Image (tube, helix red, strand yellow):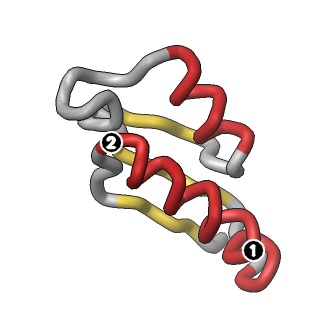
Amino acid sequence: MKLLFIGDIVGQVGIDCVRAVVPPLIAHESLDLVVANAENAANGSGLTPRQYRQLRQAGVDLITM
């Protein structure tokens, strides 16, 4: 099983980076599970529903807070 854990996503810039990097990485490395810590995605104030959807669409399977 191949696992990718993303340590911390901070702000929209971090989400944009995940959206750009993770999908090709999943394909290239045949990743089975992607876990991301997104407690600071809303500029240090948690995670909005829109940001959650963006991360899930990028291929993140499990989002931790």
Q: Earlier in the sequence, mark 1 or mark 2?
A: 2
Q: CA distance from mark 1 to mark 2?
A: 21 Å
Q: Is residue 53 above or below residue 28?
A: above
* Residue 33 point in image, percent of width and height: 63, 57
Quick check: 49 left or right of 42? right
Q: Which residue is mark 2?
A: 11
- Residue, x 30% and y 58% (percent of image)? 7
- Residue, x 59% and y 40% (percent of image)? 55
Q: Residues within 10 Å of mark 2 (few under 14, many from 20)?
A: some
- State the image quarter where residue 46 is shown: top left
* Residue 60 point in image, percent of width and height: 61, 47
Foreground: 3 or 28? 28
- Residue, x 38% and y 23% (percent of image)? 47
- The amino acid pointed to by label 1 is Pro
Label drawn at residue 10? none
Q: Is residue 42 above or below residue 13?
A: above
Q: Which residue is mark 1?
A: 24
Q: Is residue 18 above or below residue 52?
A: below
Q: Residues within 10 Å of mark 1 (few under 14, many from 20)?
A: few
Q: Nearer the viewer, mark 1 or mark 2?
A: 2
Q: Quadrant of the N terminus?
A: bottom right
Q: Quadrant of the C terminus?
A: top left
- Residue, x 63% and y 65% (percent of image)? 20
Q: Secondary structure at mark 1?
A: helix
- The amino acid pointed to by label 2 is Gly
Quick check: 58 left or right of 35? right
**Which residue in the rendered view is the most extreme toward the front?**
13
